[in-house]
Amino acid sequence: PGEEGSAKPEEPEERPKLELRSTALDLGEVRVGGSAGGTVRVANTGTGPGTVTAVEMAGEEAGAFSVSGCAGSTLEAGQECTVQVRIRPRRAGTHRARLVVRVERAPGETGEESEAPLEAVVTATAVAPRLVVRPERLDLGRVAVTESTERSLTLVNEGSAPLRVARVARQGDAAEDFRVTTGECAAPLAVGASCRLTVTFAPRVEGARRARLRLEHDDP
């Protein structure tokens, strides 16, 4: 009698399984006009190679973010790649978008489109100072030539980040009749804090005298 043949056991099919190591990324606080970044790792926890076909940001505020890395990478089983995410905000407030990582469909799966993309929520809080000057116009009244008088301007930081006043410049034909003392306003002004500028008027000639104060600061 002939020997009965034995079926060779089938080897398990190698299949990739790409996933994100985290599904949320908080970039923290960043000043308007500045930038901040973070990373999200893509891992292949399957048994076969898998390819990242595209990496992009989605959502109404996606334009504030940029991404790089991983796109076009083929990951062998156990390998990882890193997506770099950066934000450069143009306005203060909370920013939120979705990191979308598109991956190649696993072998044996049907359909023309790739697998459902991997997604992570990316958030950041943009902060900025906001300078308010009170009053906006300062009248020092009537002053005799060779005498002087002084009044104060109050600077208030109504923003969400410290304010720095780098310089106070006098402008106009009568600028030399006015003197400005910055005092405590020379130091960074904390959120919600205020300081006073002292303006001294010492006219050299008779008549109406007018000047402008230009404040150089980092309020965007």
Image (cartoon, rainbow, N blue to C red):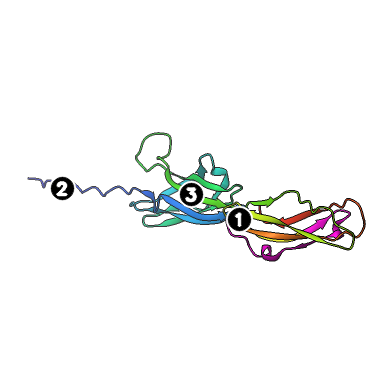
Check if mark 2's residue and mark 1's residue have beta carbons within 8 Å: no
Q: Residue at x 45, y 56 (%)?
A: 81
SS at mark 1 in the image: loop
Under mark 2, the amino acid is Ser
Rendering coords of residue 203 (x, y %): 88, 59
| In the displayed structure image, the side of residue 31 where residue 5 appears, left or right | left
Q: Residue at x 54, y 42 (%)?
A: 61
Mark 2, residue position: 6
* First-in-chain label (3 vs 2): 2
Under mark 3, the amino acid is Thr
Q: Residue at x 92, y 57 (%)?
A: 205
Front residue (pair 41, 168) = 168
* First-in-chain label (2 vs 1): 2
Q: Which residues are magenta?
A: 169-193
Residue 52 vertical position relative to residue 147 in the rendered view, above or below: above
Rendering coords of residue 202 (x, y %): 85, 61
**Which label sits on residue 123?**
3
| In the displayed structure image, the side of residue 110 where residue 196 appears, left or right | right
| In the displayed structure image, the side of residue 110 where residue 152 appears, left or right | right
Question: Residue 220, can we see it?
Answer: no
Asked if residue 158 is among those painted magenta in the image, a careful observer would answer: no
Mark 2 nearby-residue class (10 Å; few <14, some 14–19, many ≥20): few
SS at mark 2 in the image: loop
Front residue (pair 199, 217) = 199
Mark 1, residue position: 34
Q: CA distance from mark 2 to mark 1?
A: 69 Å
